[in-house]
Image: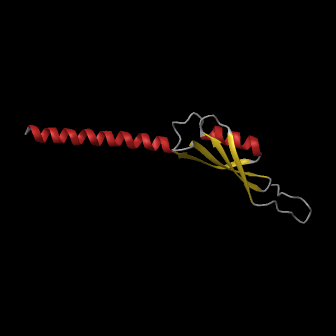
Amino acid sequence: MITTRKILNGLAFFTVLSVIAGAFIAAFSFGLLSPITGKEAAANAVARTGGYAKEVEFEYDYHTGGHYEVEVLANGLKHDVIVDADNGNVLAIHTKGHKHRYHDGSESFKM
């Protein structure tokens, strides 16, 4: 009986430990433990490119650490901006697409 109780206690301990570890990993993967929030990263990206932030994703790489990938739409162009999750610095900006010229000679469509 004592051995069965020890085995059940051990299983309960490892179950609780795995649930806590899973919660920690989930919080880490969503960037909840980084010093910079997704809103701050989006604000820094928009400050550099103009326009508005469409999408923000947190990513972690073992070698480079955590960073946010912010998709910004500005002046008819799509900018993929990488923001450091530790200090909020813009690390890179990759512009996709091209400006469309309209019949009246303007380069962007205004709503």
Residue 77 position in % (x across, y down): 76, 56
Above or below, 105 against 28 in this view is below
Quadrant holding the C terminus: bottom right
Q: Is residue 18 left or right of residue 27?
A: left
Looking at this view, name the residue that lies furthest to the left: 1
Q: Is residue 24 left or right of residue 66?
A: left
Quadrant in the picture for residue 15: top left
Quadrant holding the N terminus: top left
Quadrant in the picture for residue 66: top right
Residue sitting at x 34%, y 42%: 19
Residue sitting at x 83%, y 57%: 108
Residue 61 position in % (x across, y down): 53, 46
Residue sitting at x 49%, y 45%: 29
In this rendering, the count of numbered labels is 0
Residue sitting at x 38%, y 41%: 21
Residue 80 position in % (x across, y down): 68, 51
